[in-house]
Amino acid sequence: MNPPPLPEDALSGASLEKIHSALFEQLITGHAQMSLMLMGKLPNLHSGELEEPNLEASKIFIDQLEMLEAKTKGNRSKEEDQLLADVLLRLRTDWLGMMTAQTTEDAAAAAAAPAAPASTTPPAA
């Protein structure tokens, strides 16, 4: 899901609408990549290593894409609508799956942890 390059020669003579469309696509795919990287599903572009999942940080990028979806409604091409819908569907699905798995793991760990011993001292009066 790499953003398309915007080489100078490819943009020379392009209409402002085409330039904006290409930049919009780059913005959407860049946010998607960051969200997936923070979920630990894509390697870090600099290190090549998978990140430890940070679902809170990942959700920020999803929230920003949702904001862009709302704020640009009626101003996008059909292709831009489809790209944004597809990206948001994938990110929401992956994020929800990871959140569900994390919640299940947390619940299992809590159930497996020994219960705290009951206090034998009476409460202070």
Image: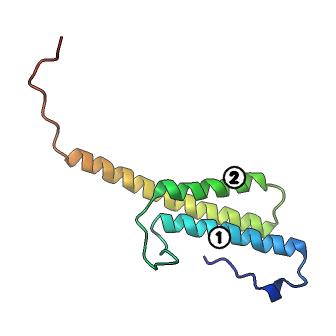
**Coordinates of residue 39 in the picture (x, y in percent):** 47, 64
Q: Position of residue 90 (x, y in %)?
A: 57, 64
What's under tag 2, amino acid-wise? Met
Residue 73 seen from this side = yes
Q: Which quadrant holds the C terminus?
A: top left
Residue 74 shown left or right of residue 84 in the figure: right
What element does badge 2 sit on?
Answer: helix
Residue in view at x 49 percent, y 64 percent: 38
Residue 101, image x and y in percent?
A: 38, 56
Instruction: Decide: is 9 above or below 25.
Output: below
Tell me the kind of residue under disc 1.
Thr
Instruction: From the image, tell me which residue sits under label 2.
Output: 67
The Cα–Cα distance between marks 2 and 1, rounded to whole angstroms, is: 15 Å
Q: Which badge, 2 or 1, comes first in the chain's sequence?
A: 1
The quarter holding residue 66 reads bottom right
Q: Is residue 111 above or below residue 43?
A: above
Q: Which residue is mark 1?
A: 29
Residue extending furthest toward the left: 120
Q: Is residue 96 visible?
A: no
Numbered disc 1: secondary structure: helix
Q: Residue 98 appears at what percent x and percent y? A: 44, 58
